[in-house]
């Protein structure tokens, strides 16, 4: 499974084999079309386009063989598309939309040419084709896209409003232009008056050939704002979920057609009023937060000394053995923990009772880790429902919906927080838990926070200021937490950034700008500590090769990463770059219930040792353990500790 472009929606990656042949194997689409017709609707059918489908596929097979060109499969893929289009035509379908968001990415020449070839072949199908692009600008694929022999084009005018002129200039006289004008990726209400102004000239030029639409599929936003009973009216007036966004599309269409109903006029006025209020609201625009960010200096994102010097101070303070063992933060979220949280949410138990229960869980996790002889402990994150929600709930500037679920994969959904306004930390968020955990043991306790980039990435972000600004506000709030943890006697603090890589823009040319502020945000959050305080970070599975410079620029004292499934191959990027700081390459895959063998973990670490010197290696699982059971965790960690001891005996 991989995330679809830069969304949090997952798809199963098609695995492609050399010489593979394709055949139509499902009737479901046709049954759904019949169902829509029976219900009295004439649907525009939407399919992933053939090139984007191939683009998202991965070649599979023996390593040597796997390196074949996916485009060799295109003809066979197109055979099936032709068959599907013909079937749809027979069912009476007039329009078929083929989603081709790959067109907003950097495409090799061969792929650009394949687009032309493919769509010339599909041209013969007896339906009208609409090629849909979204999530960004067509850029250097603009001319190519405009030349495709299709009846209509959809472009994203939210992410890339500047491209409209160029697209219209290249449109052929009969082509329809579907303008994605309502943001399908975010929850904010649209300024209908402003959009009407912007669209008026387009309407004059295109007449009936102008269609309006959301920028992309609405599966990336929650369904219905009206279902939210807990949000206050003011906040609600600033938002629009999928149903409201459809109303916006319809209202805008009628406004442009000069056939607006009184209801449409009321909607227009309400939108203007709500947006004026939002712009002026002191509830979300806080001078103290703005001022603090303005006063940030370069030095604020710099540790007091270079890693080599810090490492000496940390070694002295933490007194860890060679190949220190640790975990990534969470221990099993048991039924008992969930039950306690539920009871607390439903006000069936008091805050005091809930906190006492969480302290018991922390004490249990600490005792287990001591018994296992782990070197650097964690408190176990029992109190956290979710690694972003937990922090969002305690920060100013965040709002939470009751039913704002967004599909993540299949029946799995996530409920992202909404970052409404300036972010600030009214009070410490994790200090009491870490402090309590540390009080139970003489071993170093690692504090545990979610990083600014990950909090940003996994939330709906406000659209009235740059993402960079919001990220840095979060970073400053976390900075206070990091400093408070240090003051409370926590000598190591981990700031998780699993979402760092997935925040990369879709175009490589924009990567560096993103990485600059993402890295700076991370550094702002951690750089306030003493040299002797050890900063950790954690990332899940990532291709590190092309962002290794940014990873190094984070300047975390220790980074733990998910490497076990790649057989330590990921470490090559760190070796090639001569990555200078400590690394904990996960020695076992927490996503399986199996107990990893000692010898296996030792052999993985021996591979790591070929690339990284012993003094800079840690021994840890590859991710948090919250999804596992204690019965699985204990034998696995016992073996992991035994592996570390074996390594010390060999290399100490
Ligand atoms: N500290 C978190 C945990 O252990 C990290 C989770 C993650 O990597 N996504 O659960
Ligand atoms: Zn992870």
Image (cartoon, rainbow, N blue to C red):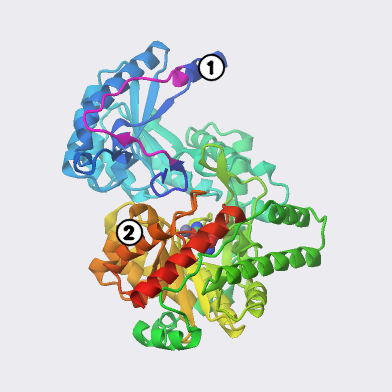
Q: For residue 286, say whether it is visible.
A: yes
Identify the mark nearer the N-term, 2 or 1: 1
What's the residue at 53%, 69% (across, down)?
Answer: 474
Q: Quadrant of residue 355?
A: bottom right
Q: Where does residue 314 sit, x and y in percent of width and height?
A: 45, 85
* 72 lies above or below 42: below
Front one among 277 and 476: 476
**Residue where numbered disc 1 is placed:** 35
Q: Would you place residue 581 above or below residue 64 in this image?
A: below
Q: Position of residue 609 (x, y in %)?
A: 30, 68
Q: Position of residue 645 (x, y in %)?
A: 44, 71
Q: Is residue 25 magenta?
A: yes
Marks 2/1 in contact by CB < 8 Å: the verdict is: no
Depth check: 320 or 63 in front? 320
From this view, report whether residue 632 is shown above or below residue 328: above
In magenta, the rendered stretch is 11-30
| Res 465 visible | no
Which residue corresponds to mark 2?
Answer: 568
Q: Residues within 10 Å of mark 2 (few under 14, many from 20)?
A: some
Q: CA distance from mark 2 to mark 1?
A: 51 Å
């Amino acid at each position: 499974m991989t995330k679809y472009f830069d969304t949090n929606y997952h798809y199963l990656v098609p695995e492609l084999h050399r010489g593979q042949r394709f055949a139509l194997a499902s009737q479901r689409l046709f049954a759904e079309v019949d169902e829509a017709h029976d219900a009295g609707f004439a649907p525009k059918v939407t399919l992933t386009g053939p090139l984007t489908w191939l683009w998202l596929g991965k070649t599979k097979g023996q390593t040597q063989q796997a390196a074949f060109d996916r485009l060799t499969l295109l003809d066979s893929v197109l055979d099936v598309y032709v068959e599907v289009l013909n079937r749809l035509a027979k069912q009476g379908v007039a329009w078929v939309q083929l989603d081709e968001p790959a067109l907003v990415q950097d495409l090799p020449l061969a792929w650009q040419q394949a687009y032309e070839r493919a769509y010339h072949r599909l041209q013969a199908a007896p339906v009208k084709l609409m090629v849909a692009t979204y999530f960004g600008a067509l850029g250097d694929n603009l001319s190519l896209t405009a030349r495709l022999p299709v009846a209509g084009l959809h472009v994203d005018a939210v992410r890339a409003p500047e491209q409209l002129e160029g697209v219209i200039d290249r449109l052929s006289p009969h082509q329809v232009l579907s303008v994605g004008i309502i943001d399908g990726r975010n929850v904010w209400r649209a300024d209908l008056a402003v959009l009407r102004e912007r669209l008026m000239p387009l309407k004059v030029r295109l007449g009936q050939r102008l269609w309006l639409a959301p920028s992309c599929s609405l599966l990336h936003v929650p369904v219905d704002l009206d279902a939210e009973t807990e949000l206050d009216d003011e906040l609600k007036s600033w938002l629009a979920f999928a149903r409201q966004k459809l109303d916006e599309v319809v209202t805008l269409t009628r406004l442009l057609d000069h056939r607006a109903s009184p209801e449409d006029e009321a909607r227009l006025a309400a939108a203007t009023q709500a947006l004026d209020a939002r712009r002026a609201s002191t509830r979300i625009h806080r001078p103290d937060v703005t001022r603090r960010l303005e006063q940030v200096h370069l030095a604020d994102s710099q540790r007091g000394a270079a890693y080599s010097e810090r490492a000496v101070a940390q070694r002295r303070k933490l007194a860890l053995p060679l190949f220190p063992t640790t975990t990534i933060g969470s221990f099993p979220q048991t039924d008992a923990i969930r039950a306690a949280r539920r009871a607390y949410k439903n006000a069936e138990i008091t805050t005091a009772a809930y906190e006492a229960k969480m302290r018991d869980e922390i004490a249990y996790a600490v005792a287990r880790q001591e018994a296992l002889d782990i070197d650097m402990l964690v408190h176990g994150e029992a109190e956290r429902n979710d690694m972003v929600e937990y922090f969002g709930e305690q920060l100013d500037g965040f709002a939470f919906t009751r039913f704002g679920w967004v599909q993540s994969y299949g029946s799995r959904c996530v409920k992202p927080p909404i970052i409404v306004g300036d972010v600030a930390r009214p009070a410490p968020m994790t200090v009491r838990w870490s402090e309590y955990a540390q009080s139970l043991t003489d071993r170093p306790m690692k504090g545990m926070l979610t990083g600014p980039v990950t909090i940003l990435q996994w939330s709906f972000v406000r659209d009235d200021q740059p993402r960079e600004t919001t990220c840095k506000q979060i970073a400053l709030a976390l900075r206070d937490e990091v400093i408070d943890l240090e003051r409370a006697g926590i000598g190591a603090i981990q700031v998780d950034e699993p979402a760092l890589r997935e925040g990369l823009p879709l175009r490589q040319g924009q990567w560096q700008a993103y990485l600059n502020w993402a890295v700076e945000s991370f550094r702002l959050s951690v750089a306030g500590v003493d040299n002797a305080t050890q900063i950790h970070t954690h990332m899940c599975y990532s291709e590190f090769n092309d962002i290794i410079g940014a990873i190094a620029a984070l300047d975390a004292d220790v980074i733990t990463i998910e490497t076990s499934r790649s057989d330590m191959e990921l470490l090559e990027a760190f070796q090639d770059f001569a990555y200078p700081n400590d690394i904990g390459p996960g020695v076992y895959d927490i996503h399986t219930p199996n107990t990893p063998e000692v010898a296996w973990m030792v052999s993985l670490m021996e591979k790591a040792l070929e690339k990284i010197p012993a003094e800079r290696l840690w021994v840890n699982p590859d991710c948090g353990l919250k999804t596992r059971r204690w019965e699985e965790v204990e034998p696995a960690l016992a073996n992991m500790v035994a592996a570390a001891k074996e390594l010390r005996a060999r290399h100490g």
